[in-house]
Structures are given as structure tokens and as C-alpha cells.
């Protein structure tokens, strides 16, 4: 169990930790010289069951709340320290508000310095603390009057902490796989002679073993775990809830790459972001409302970064109110759904609110629409199973399952189990409600039928044209899978690039059929440079307008391809040209297909060669890069 102290400066937090553990958590020379805590301190003591109780001692000065926050976000148990002579003070109240916003409900109060005041003052201070705790998550927590100087009352507190540690719910045991991917919030980095770079922090989720390959996030630098100290003991593993020191090494990794607020994590949990959709609560004691686009200090894990608050429901959030908001950060950080955060005012002089991350990868646009509000409401559900069900209901355009697993920090095994447990249709990594997928299938069939009614002279739309008519916001690959499914069920037919219902046919008149039989040999006679439309009309003594309309119909039927404005090619000719393009690409070290090389191979003019390559670009056979083309 990790115990975090909290409270006003000079109320005896560090002295109490020393009385409980025998360790002076003030590790800096300046701290010892001035007699005040400036940064996070750490201490450990063994428990009767063989486990270790860890302490994070935080500074109490009003100007060092950012350091307090770096340690408070990873604790299991709060030890609120209040001096009996002073009673609750400004930082007592601010620290308590922070702990409340972080959702920390397990704790106790140490009423220190009882050796300095009469008994009646102790009783009075105890009543003040009880009043202070009312309405907070720590309401009803036990209060232990004690003196860290003479030891009075310290033993009962120590015994209570031991009991709390043994009763801590969901505490991992060695060998048990942990939920989620490994994430450690870095609050300190240093080097040791003969060891190398060491980072310390609290494990938010998952587990780690010596030899594991991890990432330093958000930079994305690969690191390897050379050694682990968990709860101040050498270990082969580090588990959720433990304070760990990781000895890291990497080819492109150095101590200068690390700063407080970074994460060391498993690759599936790496998702750098500069926007977060959140549920935000403004403290009732805030001195003024929070307005849209207000600048704030944003704290999550051990990071402190400037940000703007974009309110999503109203333009103003009043003290004591809660609402959806989007946090727009000045720089990239790591954050996932469920992470708790704190915001302080622009001058970092007071805490104004906090809340919980709902979506670490939100949209920049259309963030206030009713549809988006429905998604955020779904993201507030308590379990990943319930969240996915709610998002499926609120997102008919589909959910990216890989992005969902990342935002919820699901391990690959957890993500697969969830896919099996929630009814849905999963196509190319995108999930749809079953009824929505069936509606999409039906919409495709109905749209094709309508197209056939409106344009009986054409075979049908292309796949992309149909997507824009039926589901313009759907990812193209997913829509292609939908079409493939319908085709496999014999509900639609693809003729060339065109899609149509099985019963739909374009038939030529007997006169046009005779002309077509004469046109085909002429197009095949010069496969790479067939006659233009007007030349075909002149050769066959047919009206040019009729010839042009006939070739348009033949193109709609898939009998010919319209490669350029006045050039129609036979399908077998296009296939030969594609093969030649492939051969040219294979024969070049860089795979480039230039117009000159292509022209020389097919024996045409440069203009027509370019037109053919542009036709291949449009048909996704090649892609253009500068003056050259590459096979897709």
C-alpha cells in the first residue's frame, strides 16, 4: 500500500513519517538546511505479513502544490496531517480538496503536536477536523491524536495503517497477471554509478518484469528494463499500486530524455495526445466561475502543463457545478480514460477544480453536437463492457476497436474478450451495432435500386460513388468490406468498376449491337492507341454523337474503359498496360514509372502515355509522386 501525506506546511508530516518508518524523507540538502520539505520524499517500512508499506511525503507550502500533486495521484491511502495548535489551515483545505477531486476516499487524520497544547485544545482541534471532513470523501475517517516527538499515539496509527494495508481491495499478488497494460508515472530520474539511468514512480496499471521492452512516453523512445526495485526491495516484477524504481537502458535513450510527468509503459498503452475530453468539476469554493477557453495549469499523473479549457455544454461553469469539457494542452502528454486530473488557475496560486478523463483522443470539430454528448455520456459508464455498448448505440458510423482498447488501456487479451462479449459486427477493426450493420446493407441495396430507376441507361455507380451516397463518413476500407459481404451473398454484382443489382442489365439496341461488333476489332487493332471517337465515327460512317453515346453506354456496361477524354480502351488492353507498368517498376531500383519509360514501352506519344498513367492513378493502380508514379 502507498500512503500519501497531505497538509499545511510545518504541521509535522515529515516528522510523522520518520516516527512511523525511521526514515527521514527529506533527502535534499536544502530541505535539511531550511527544515521544510520542498519536493517529494519517500520512505518504506515492512509489514507483519511480509509486504512493504510505502510513504510519499509531500511539501505543504502553497507554492509547492505542483510537487504535492506529482505524488498524490498514485497513492492508495491518505494520511492528512493537522497540527493541534494551528488546526486546519489554508493548505490543509486545498490539499483536502485535491484529494477529494482525485477520488481518494480511504484515509486517516493524524492530529500532531499534541505535546504542545493542553487536552482541551486537542479536543477542540479534533472537532475542527471532523467539521472540515464533512461532505468530503474522507468524511468519517478516524482521527489519531499523537506526537511525533515523544511517540505518544503513534503506535495506534501504525496498527491502523497495517490493518488498512491488509484490507486493501484488489491488491495484486506476485504471479497474478494485472489488468491493463503497464503504466508507471515518472516522478524522479537519476543516474547511479555502475547502474545507469533509474526512473521512479507509482505503477498505475499492469505489471512489469526484468527484461521487458517498454516505451518512454510521450516521446516514444524504446527502453529495456535492466532491473526493478519494488517498494524499496530488489524484485523481478513490479505490480499495480507499487512504487517502483526501474533501471532502464536503450540504444537511443539517455537521462536527458526523461522528465517528471513522463510515463514508462507497454507499447499498447502509448497514445500521446494534446486534447482530452473530460468530466470537469469546479470547486464550490472557487472564487469565480470558469469561462470557456480559460487558461489553467493541468496536472495528471506527475505532469504539470499549461492548457485551455473548452467548455462543451455551456460558456460558463459556476462554482460547484460539473460539466463536459475539452482540455487543449500546450504540449503532448500521455493520458488514458479514467485518469484523474487537477486544474489550477493560470498563476498556479490556487486549485480550482478537477475530474476524470473520458476520451484521450477526442475530435477537434463538432465537439458540442448532441451526438458527441451521447458518446461522452457513454464514456462515463463504469466498465469497459458498458462503455462499449453505450458507444455502439451512440456511434452508428462505427467504433475503431484498436483506438477504444488504447483509450481504455485494455490488454490484447482483455480487448479480445470484450469483442466476444459485446454483440456487434466487427469489420476491419471497426465495430457496428448489429442492427446498424443490417441497416447499412439494406441502404446499399435500396440506393442501387434507386440509381437503376433514375439512370436505367447506366450500369450503376462505382464503389466510392456509392459510399458517398450511402455512408460518406464511413472509412473506405470498411465500406469495401460491406460491399464484399453483399457480393458474397449474391445481393450485388460488380461489373468492371460499377456496382449493380443482379437483375439490372443494360442492353444495346440491335442497331447499336451491330455497330459495337464493328468497333471492338478497331479498338483491339491498336490496343495501346485506339482510334478516337470521331475517327471511329468517320470510319464506320456513324453519326459522331451516336458513337459517343454508344461508347459511354459500353463503358457503363464494363465493356470498355474511358481512359481519356476521347479515348476508349478494351479491358484486355488496359490489363496489358497495367502489366507493362508493373514490369517497368520492377526494373527500376526506386520502383519509379516515368512517362518517358512508359511511352517508350508502349510506343505512343508522351501525352497519351501520361493520360494512361493518370488513369491508373485514379483507379488506384499507381500513385503519383512528383513527376513519377509508383505501384500501389
Image: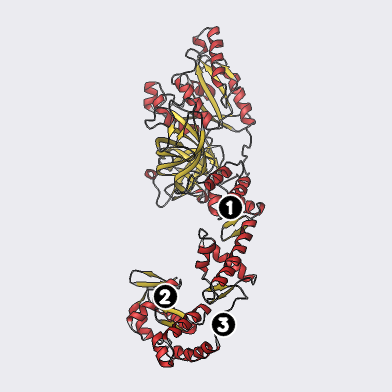
Q: Which mark is residue 615?
A: 2
| Percent x, y of residue 325 | 48, 39
The answer to which of 512 and 468 lies nearer the viewer is: 512
Q: Quadrant of residue 452?
A: bottom right
Give SS at disc 1. helix
| Percent x, y of residue 576 | 46, 83
Label 1 CA crowd tier, 10 Å (few <14, some 14–19, many 20+)? some
Mark nearer the viewer, 2 or 3: 3
The answer to which of 546 and 295 lies nearer the viewer is: 546
Label 2 CA crowd tier, 10 Å (few <14, some 14–19, many 20+)? some
Q: CA distance from mark 1 to mark 3?
A: 53 Å
Answer with left or right where residue 577 lies relative to residue 1: left
Q: CA distance from mark 1 to mark 2?
A: 42 Å
Q: Which residue has dot 3 on it?
A: 507
1 above or below 437?
above
Q: CA distance from mark 2 to mark 3?
A: 27 Å
Q: How is the image coloured?
A: secondary structure
Q: Quadrant of residue 431?
A: bottom right
Is residue 578 among what the camera can see? Answer: no
**Of label 1 and label 2, which has the lower sequence position?**
1
Amino acid at each position: 500500500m502507498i500512503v500519501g501525506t497531505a497538509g499545511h506546511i510545518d504541521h509535522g508530516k515529515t516528522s510523522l513519517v520518520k516516527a512511523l518508518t525511521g526514515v527521514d524523507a527529506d533527502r535534499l540538502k536544502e530541505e535539511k538546511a531550511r527544515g521544510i520539505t520542498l519536493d517529494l520524499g519517500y520512505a518504506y517500512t515492512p509489514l507483519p505479513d511480509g509486504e512493504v508499506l510505502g510513504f510519499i511525503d509531500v511539501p505543504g507550502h502553497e507554492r509547492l502544490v505542483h510537487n504535492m500533486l506529482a505524488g498524490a495521484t498514485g497513492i492508495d491511502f491518505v494520511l492528512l496531517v493537522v497540527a493541534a495548535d494551528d488546526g486546519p489551515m489554508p493548505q490543509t483545505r486545498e490539499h483536502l480538496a485535491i484529494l477529494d477531486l482525485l477520488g481518494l476516499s480511504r484515509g486517516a487524520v493524524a492530529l500532531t503536536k499534541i505535546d504542545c497544547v493542553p487536552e482541551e485544545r486537542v479536543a477542540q482541534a479534533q472537532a475542527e477536523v471532523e467539521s472540515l471532513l464533512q461532505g468530503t470523501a474522507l468524511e468519517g475517517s478516524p482521527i489519531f491524536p499523537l506526537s511525533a516527538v515523544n511517540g505518544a499515539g503513534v503506535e495506534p496509527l501504525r496498527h491502523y495503517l497495517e490493518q488498512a494495508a491488509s484490507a486493501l481491495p484488489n491488491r495484486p499478488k506476485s504471479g497474478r497477471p494485472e489488468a491493463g497494460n503497464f503504466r508507471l508515472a515518472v516522478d524522479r530520474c537519476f543516474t547511479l554509478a555502475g547502474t545507469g539511468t533509474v526512473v521512479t514512480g507509482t505503477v498505475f496499471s499492469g505489471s512489469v518484469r526484468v527484461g521487458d521492452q517498454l516505451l518512454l512516453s510521450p516521446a516514444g523512445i524504446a527502453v529495456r528494463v535492466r532491473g526493478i526495485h519494488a517498494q524499496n526491495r530488489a524484485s523481478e516484477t513490479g505490480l499495480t499500486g507499487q512504487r517502483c524504481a526501474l533501471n532502464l537502458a536503450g540504444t537511443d535513450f539517455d537521462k536527458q530524455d526523461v522528465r517528471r510527468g513522463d510515463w514508462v509503459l507497454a507499447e499498447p498503452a502509448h497514445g500521446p495526445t494534446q486534447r482530452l475530453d473530460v468530466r470537469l468539476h469546479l470547486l464550490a469554493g472557487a472564487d469565480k466561475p470558469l469561462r470557456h477557453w480559460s487558461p489553467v495549469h493541468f496536472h495528471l499523473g506527475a505532469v504539470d502543463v499549461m492548457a485551455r479549457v473548452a467548455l462543451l455544454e455551456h460558456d460558463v461553469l459556476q462554482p460547484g457545478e460539473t460539466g463536459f469539457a475539452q482540455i487543449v494542452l500546450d504540449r503532448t502528454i500521455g493520458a488514458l480514460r479514467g485518469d484523474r486530473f487537477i486544474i489550477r488557475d493560470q498563476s498556479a496560486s490556487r486549485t480550482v477544480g478537477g475530474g476524470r478523463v473520458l476520451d484521450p483522443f477526442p475530435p477537434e470539430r463538432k465537439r458540442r453536437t448532441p451526438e458527441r454528448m451521447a458518446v461522452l455520456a457513454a464514456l462515463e459508464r463504469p466498465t469497459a463492457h458498458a462503455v462499449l455498448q453505450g458507444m455502439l448505440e451512440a456511434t452508428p458510423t462505427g467504433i475503431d476497436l484498436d483506438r477504444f482498447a488504447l483509450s481504455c488501456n485494455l490488454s490484447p487479451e482483455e480487448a479480445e474478450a470484450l469483442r466476444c462479449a459485446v454483440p456487434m459486427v466487427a469489420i476491419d477493426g471497426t465495430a457496428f451495432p448489429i442492427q446498424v450493420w443490417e441497416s447499412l446493407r439494406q441502404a446499399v441495396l435500396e440506393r442501387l435500386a434507386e440509381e437503376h430507376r433514375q439512370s436505367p441507361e447506366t450500369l450503376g455507380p462505382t464503389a466510392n460513388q456509392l459510399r458517398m451516397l450511402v455512408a460518406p463518413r464511413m472509412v473506405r476500407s470498411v465500406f469495401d468490406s460491406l460491399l464484399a459481404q453483399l457480393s458474397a451473398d449474391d445481393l450485388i454484382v460488380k461489373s468492371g468498376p460499377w456496382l449493380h443489382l443482379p437483375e439490372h442489365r443494360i442492353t444495346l439496341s440491335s442497331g447499336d449491337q451491330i455497330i459495337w461488333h464493328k468497333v471492338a476489332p478497331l479498338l483491339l487493332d491498336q490496343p495501346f492507341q485506339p482510334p478516337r471517337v470521331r475517327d471511329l465515327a468517320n470510319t464506320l460512317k456513324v453519326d459522331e454523337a451516336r458513337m459517343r453515346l454508344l461508347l459511354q453506354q459500353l463503358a457503363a456496361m464494363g465493356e470498355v474503359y474511358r481512359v481519356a477524354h476521347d479515348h476508349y480502351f478494351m479491358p484486355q488492353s488496359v490489363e496489358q498496360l497495367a502489366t507493362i507498368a508493373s514490369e517497368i517498376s520492377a526494373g527500376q531500383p526506386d520502383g519509379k514509372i516515368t512517362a518517358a519509360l512508359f511511352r517508350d514501352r508502349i510506343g505512343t506519344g508522351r501525352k497519351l502515355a501520361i493520360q494512361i498513367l493518370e488513369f491508373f492513378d485514379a483507379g488506384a493502380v499507381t500513385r503519383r509522386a512528383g513527376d513519377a508514379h509508383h505501384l500501389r
